Amino acid sequence: MAGLEVLYTCVGGSVTCPQDAVVCFVHWEMVKSGYRCLGSGDEVT
């Protein structure tokens, strides 16, 4: 769970409602499961 603790440390000040915490947790679970973020202009190789 070290990754989740690091994520919370980074965004803890921005969490203002329970839904914010859920979004952080789901994001962490998806990245941990191998999903990656692609931004505008990124290409999948």
Image: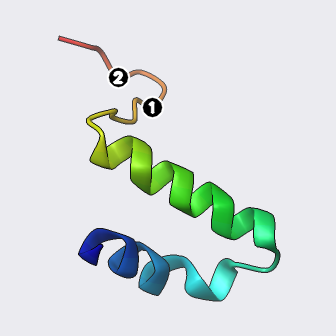
- Farthest residue to the front: give it: 1
Left or right: residue 31 compared with residue 17: left
**Mark 1 crowdedness (10 Å alpha carbons): few <14, some 14-19, many ≥20:** few
Left or right: residue 9 compared with residue 14: left
Q: Say what secondary structure mark 2 lies in.
A: loop
**Which of the pair 3/40 is nearer the observer?**
3
| Residue 33 place in picture, x, y as percent | 30, 40
Query: Are dots 1 and 2 in contact, CB under 8 Å?
Result: yes
Q: Amino acid at mark 1?
A: Gly
Figure check: 32 above or below 44: below
* Residue topped by disc 2: 42
3D distance between C-alphas at marks 1 and 2: 5 Å
Figure check: 23 above or below 17: above
For the point 34% across and 33% down, the residue is 35
**Which of the pair 18/7 is nearer the observer?**
18
Figure check: 19 above or below 29: below
Q: Say what secondary structure mark 1 lies in.
A: loop
* Residue topped by disc 1: 39
Q: Amino acid at mark 2?
A: Asp
Q: Give the quarter of the image for residue 19.
A: bottom right
For the point 34% across and 79% down, the residue is 6
